[in-house]
Image (cartoon, rainbow, N blue to C red):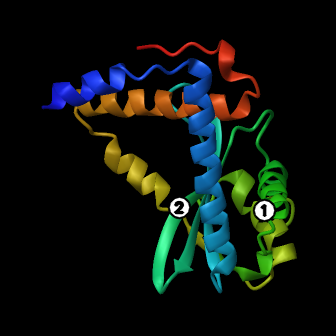
Amino acid sequence: MFEDHVQKIKNIPLSNSTVSRRIKDMSIDIQATINERTKKSPFFSIQVDERTDVSDLSILLVIARYLNVNELEENLLLCYPPTKRCTGEDIFNAIQDYFCENELDWAKCCGVCTDCGTSMSGCYKDLSGRIKIVTPHVTWSHCCINRQNLAAKPLPDSLKEVLNKSVKVVNFIRLIQLTPDCSNLCVET
């Protein structure tokens, strides 16, 4: 039965550009939905983390928590590959640009959660100081991403392999999103 479904999918003729266009369309739709829900929520909080993945690619992650139809939801708001050093100012500017581009209101941000790294926790020049300038009422807390990361460390080799392949797939999809003409990208099978 499973093989029948696999064969049906293999019989669908798709070019690299068709697949990349569909991935891009789906990601735009998901991003629009998350932004709309965040805007409609009476408040939201963000969790900010900058780290390097298994492919040595630096990534700035911003996760939003917001109220959607009386339920608290959590979704990835921004996944940004910094092109240079990652200071608190650079992180703030990336988030600020995203907020401006998507018309998200800092006044609704009630909390920020970071890992308290040096670029995050300075009181004037770094991320916390810059956010407190635009939204002084915000509360600050320590990030749980690091605890989740530490909990995942003792994974069996088979699960680590799956996780590493998943990261590579996500990075490939992100590359497709960042590349205007994706027709020259090859998909490994």
Which residue carries the number 2 mark? 75
Q: Residue at x 50, y 21 (%)?
A: 14
Residue 78 visible in the displayed image: no
| Residue 100 falls left or right of residue 76 | right
Does 151 sit above or below residue 2? below
| Residue 156 falls left or right of residue 49 | left
Q: Secondary structure at mark 2?
A: strand
Name the disc covering residue 135, or none.
none
Give the number of marks: 2
Mark 2: amino acid: Asn
| Residue 34 falls left or right of residue 167 | right
Q: Residue at x 71, y 62 (%)?
A: 121
99 or 55: nearer the viewer: 99
Which comes before the other along the chain, label 2 or label 1?
2
Name the quadrant of the N terminus. top left
**Quarter-wise, where is residue 6 in the image?**
top left
Q: Residue furthest left?
A: 1
Point out residue 79 in the picture as x, y percentages from the top left corner.
64, 47
Q: Residue at x 68, y 22 (%)?
A: 182
What is the spatial separation of the Cα atoms under label 2 and label 1, in whole angstroms? 15 Å
9 or 73: nearer the viewer: 9
Which residue carries the number 1 mark? 102
Point out residue 131 in the picture as x, y percentages from the top left corner.
79, 69
**Quarter-wise, where is residue 80 in the image?**
top right
Point out residue 114 in the picture as x, y percentages from the top left corner.
61, 61
Q: Secondary structure at mark 1?
A: loop
